[in-house]
Image (spheres, coloured by chain):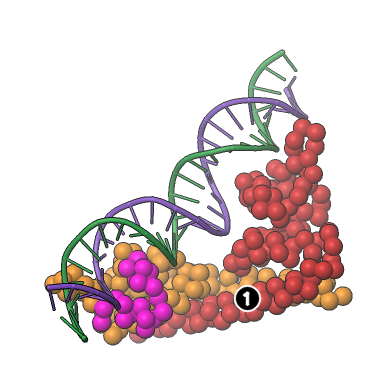
Chain colours: A orange, B red, C green, D purple
Amino acid sequence: MKIGELAKRTGVSIRMLRYYEAEGLLKPTRATNGYRHYGQGEIRTVERIKLLGSAGMTLATIKQFLPCVRGEGPVFEPCDELRNVLHEQIKLADQKAAKLAQSRAILESFLCDIER
Amino acid sequence: MKIGELAKRTGVSIRMLRYYEAEGLLKPTRATNGYRHYGQGEIRTVERIKLLGSAGMTLATIKQFLPCVRGEGPVFEPCDELRNVLHEQIKLADQKAAKLAQSRAILESFLCDIER
DNA sequence: CTAAACCCTTACAGTGCTGTAAGAGTCAAG
DNA sequence: CTTGACTCTTACAGCACTGTAAGGGTTTAG
């Protein structure tokens, strides 16, 4: 599938798909004319990137575990460090969730103040 | 209190305190020598800004309800629209929390894949 | 009085996206 | 064969922060 179609299917702009590639998150094959060609699996990958990104994760961070998860490349050596990265990211996510909850509480207290 | 002290007490850099002011979130008085002077209440304000900001809220967004909450200025007219803004922000916070939960789940599934 | 420690303003830089534009090749339908 | 829809690369721009530096006053302790 070409880039336009992937963009439509994932809701991610062509611009960003190319950016993902530039950052090393996607590695589409190239047709002889230079056009990028994506497999079906990329849809899922992009959707995950999108989701992780929307949760405030940096592409550089996502990149750290994406290759290993896709099952491409060696899953031996680096995966020990990867585990740590994952644990750390989960911890960060939890911290963010806590902040978000606090923040939400403040907003609601504001609402109370107004409705008084 | 001068800016350096406020910075120390809140953990927000001097740079950012000035930035908050430039964006209209803080309005310190000025001594005759031009030095900014903050009251005790500003500590709380800054901490709230910090918290809301750390939850991914833009300063422009925070600014929308901060004045009304501080009790300064008119609390009549704009507060109807303010209520809407607050509701919307709460909704957004909930959406973010959902994304975060999804994201976290993905990370954990990655962890499972590895530990297999 | 002098030096250290603060404060002021202005401004440029960098990060992580994200859009848009320019200039050019490719492809498919009529 | 031409036209419209795609694609490619490169590059500039903007947003929301955030740091740092330059150039210059103010304050306070020794």
- Tell me which corner region of the image, top left, top right, bottom left or bottom right, holds residue A104: bottom right
Asked if residue A47 is positioned above or below residue B13 in the image, the reply reads: below
Q: Is residue B58 visible?
A: yes
Residue A112 screen position, x and y as percent: 81, 75
Magenta: main secondary structure = helix
The residue lying at 77 percent from left, 47 percent from top is B28
Q: Quadrant of residue A115?
A: bottom right
* Protein chain holding label 1: B
* Horizontal side of residue C4 vs A12, given as left or right: right
Outermost residue to the right: A116
Q: What range of the chain is rendered magenta?
A: A1-20
The type of residue carrying mark 1 is Ala
Q: Quadrant of residue D26?
A: top right
In this rendering, the answer to whether B65 lies above or below A68 is above
Q: Between A47 and B6, which is closer to the camera in this rendering?
A: A47
Residue at disc 1, secondary structure:
helix
On the image, the x and y values in percent for residue B42 come to 77, 54
Q: Residues within 10 Å of mark 1 (few under 14, many from 20)?
A: many
Q: Nearer the viewer, residue A77 or B87?
A: B87
Q: Is B7 within the magenta?
A: no
Left or right of B24: which side holds C18? left
- Give percent across and percent down for residue C4: 64, 28
Identify the residue position indicated by label 1 in the image.
B93
| Residue beneath the point at 58% across and 80% down | B95
